[in-house]
Image: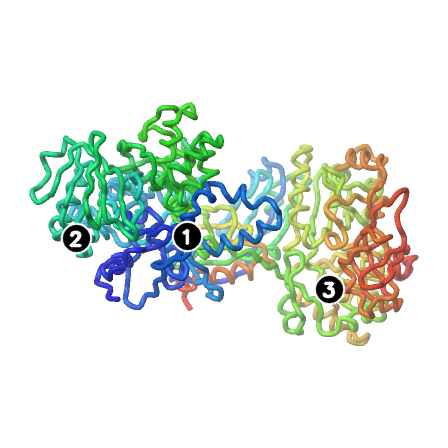
Amino acid sequence: MHVADGDTVAAALYRAGVRTFSRSVKYHRRRGLYCGTGDCPNCLMTVDGQPAVRTCVAAGRDGMSVTRSGGWPSADRDLLHVTESLHRVMPVGFYYKTFIRPRFAWPIAERVIRRATGLGKLPPTREAARKVVRHEHVDVLVIGAGAAGLGAARDSVTSSARSVIVCDEGRVGAGVAPGAPLDRIRELEAEVRADGSVIVLEDHVAIGVYDGLHVPLASELELVHVYPERVVVATGASQTHAVFPGNDLPGVMLGRAAAALAGVHRVRPGDRAVMAVGNEEGLDHLDTLLAVGVSIVALVVPAALADRVPDGVGEVVVDGHVHEARGRAAVREVVLGRRGRGKRFACDLLVLSLGLAPRDGLARMALADEPVTLAGDAARGVDEEPLARDGTVCLCEDVSVHDLEQAWREGYRGAEILKRYTTTTMGPCQGAMCGRALSCFAAARGGSVHAGSSAATAPRTTARPPARPVTLETLAAGVHEIVDKRTSLHELHVAAGARLDRSGGWLRPFTYGDWREEYRAVRERVSIMDVGTLGKFTIGGPDASALVGRVFPCRTDDLTPGRTRYVLTLDEAGYVMDDGLLARVGDLEWYLTSTSGGAGRTDARLRNFADRFALDVHVLDRTSQWGAINVAGPHARDLLEQLTDDDVGTDAMPFPGFADITVAGIACRAIRTGFVGELAFELHHPRSRGPALWRALAEAGRRWNLVPHGLDALELLRLEKGHLYLGQDTMPDDTPTKLGMAWAVDTSKPWFVGKLALERMEARSLPRRHVGLEFTGCPAHAAGLRGEPLLAGGDVVGRVTSAERSIALDRAIGLGWVRSVGDGFPTRFTVGSGAIATVVPTPFYDAGGARMRG
Amino acid sequence: MAELRATSPRVVAVLASSGACDRVVPRDGVRVVRVARREVLLVSDADIDVREVGEQVDEPHAVVDDVSAAWAALLLAGDRSREAFARVCELELPRDGWVQGEVARAAATVIAEPALVTILVASMLAAHVEDRIRTDAAELLAP
């Protein structure tokens, strides 16, 4: 079809003869062009694949693909319209009552209902467009670019202020018929644009007003987060939605829609019209319609305006009302009432210009003390409107007066609870049309403290964002959940062809090609691993020892400088949060490592407790400052001796301990560790020297055929030692005792974080514990058993948390948790498809620890 | 346009009592950023004399340490530098001063000058933040 210059999508469709714009969501009633101002749901269509586009304000262009929503097989011939005849068996809230028994019925019914409703389908394969996201801090944000908004923007101009004015209906002045109002808008627009301090954002929609103040503005291309000092809501007023039988028939139209069709788009909205006018704007609409040759067969007008009715109008009904609109596919007849008597008029158009209601929803989202003000028609009062005996209240959700009455009888007596039960005001228009009618309905029935309120004073339901339909694409714009941390060795890993993946918030090498070869390098020769991801902290100051003594559950006062100890971190509930190594550097200085994923939380907790206990402590997070490389394997010491003049022998650096040494000319803190179960030194060093240190170690290690190892090899290395991976092997409510690590807690200490909770839990029987497992009858690659339930006597009594075939032991081993059954813990289970798991002691490998003590 | 450049500034951390932190005096070319009541960062393109800073602090248990390796600086220069910055951060920049907050979801200290925005982030996150700026502000950046 042809799209004329300046046409909206809806205007082009109307010109082409389309009258049914959509089908209602529940009863599939025909819906035609109604408000013409983007307030109601009637013209929502799928445009170029995007559902729920407000076609009455969306600019049209040739070649657009436009699909009406609702209706099967089409919106014009909709077989689902049969649901209207089932109104009696589908009362309001029917799906709360009808499908709850039997329980299997609801999933089926839900699918059927979902297919029969909705505002279109999302394209399954469409790539999300990249929306620009930007942030603007301004003094004044004016929402609405009519005369009032432009005036407010102009008045906001000062020597230092920055302002934004946003127009949500295309370009400024779009949709306003030529004449004095448009001339005034053009004049103000010129003034505003002449001042460089006002940013004019056209075709942007204010999504909501959030605390702060923060107002996101969305357009097709961008999402602008505006943080204004104050907001002026100048969104004007919408025409009141009159409720009477037949009020949703195609051909029933608000005055602004009819006038825009006639005055702006030069499309005659109908041939024979009945019109109801309640204010001076209505008389303007009347003039516009007469000018394009619409025959006004009858006019309802208040006595105050009766003498201003122009010539050429048929019957004038003074102080009358619209009683009913009738028709099948569109309005064919209107019944006007006056003093209890009705009269019918044949017509194809009913135009309603009865009154105005402020569009103040955005302002009502703000807190009472926030600087959000209303301007222009948005600040006006509500024109009175009579409450009818029947008719459609909520166009979005297909709720009638009859439905509200039934809900009222069922006990839902208040606007807020009626809203939730009937879903009135919860559709795309967010109550723009029906909100006042709902509030007025509740108030008139006296169910609230506001009994007897009029339309003007009835309290509204809470306004919440979004104020307008917003796409998921817009909501997701600028959201980047993945933040990858990189060590200083990242480029070296990439160059070595490592398979990198995410672990604990970092991009880490999982393998450099053959993880079994990497494993053998650690067990038989020497290997290096990038462990720069570990959390690293210096804790210093006069009260540093007091802090570590209170934060960690183990004894710390017996640690001498140069010695380290494995520590658990507990929360106040006694649950294990993290673990690491605590090293005593000096009388007033400690050094702590944490897990890679736990660094941020550890930093926060240390600072938190220092502050809570009023301790004179400095916590310096060195995670980003220092890298770390673990040198592990039987030849680890031999390798270091190639690169350092410092003594790295057992006497100078016993296990567990550390020393500050120089390796390949780089100052390092060398810490003896035992996670992989071999002689190992973690070299903590300035991050900037990491690549040089890595290269030096790799070069010196060539004589032992050094290969670096990644997380895949580490998985088996630590499993053979029975070491836990926090998070993988543990659960959020694990205590040291459940993990078999009660040895890491010194209960004789007077106090530490979590002690009280631990004492209470220790007094009760142990519900679950972590165990070592050995598997028989399982596949050669036992890793598949991870996550499998452990069964005893047919009952699930536990779960496998780690499993792998040990290369050193040539048998399948694992870790898991087991819950108590009766008086004890089962020790033999079936797992997976026929394997047998048996509880065995850990470590599996080098139980005495001779190798790691080196 | 805006120009984005990554650099490695000299950064010295001072962890000391509030009074001792007050005694840190900026030298020419050194920006003193009081990130917390008991914590100061000194940032410069040139070397910073750690010993001199220690003498200013003059507190026995204070930590005064060159932590340059911990930090990376991303410099946005040019007439559209602030516009480019606003693509990845909601912080309101002063004309000449500094703020702390989240830039592209990474914790950052941001030093603003009339035609230069310096984003100080942990070096482990520098690549991420640089990638985000180059993607989200692509059309504002000089090639």
Separation (CA) of disc 3 from disc 2: 78 Å
Q: Identify residue type, mark 3.
A: Leu
Displayed quadrant of residue A713: bottom right
Q: On the rendered image, what quadrant is the C terminus of chain B found in?
A: bottom left
In the image, residue A381 sits, relative to residue A527, either above or below, namely above
Q: Identify residue type, mark 2.
A: Asp
| Left or right of A853 on screen, residue A438 | left
Q: Which residue is mark 2?
A: A271
Mark positioned earlier in the residue sequence (1 or 3): 1
In the image, residue A90 sits, relative to residue A317, either above or below, namely below
Mark positioned earlier in the residue sequence (1 or 2): 1
Whether residue A487 is visible, yes or no, is no
Badge 2 crowding class, 10 Å Cα cut-off, few under 14, some 14 to 19, many 20 or more, is some
* Residue under the point 45% across and 49% down: B90
Q: Which residue is mark 1?
A: A82
* Residue under the point 24% across and 37% down: A355
Q: On the rendered image, what quadrant is the N terminus of chain B found in?
A: bottom left
Subunit under mark 2: A
Q: Using the rendered image, report if marks 1 and 3 lie on a common chain.
A: yes
Residue A322, percent from left and from top: 24, 38
Residue A760, percent from left and from top: 81, 33
Mark linked to residue A711: 3
| Left or right of A714 on screen, residue B47 | left
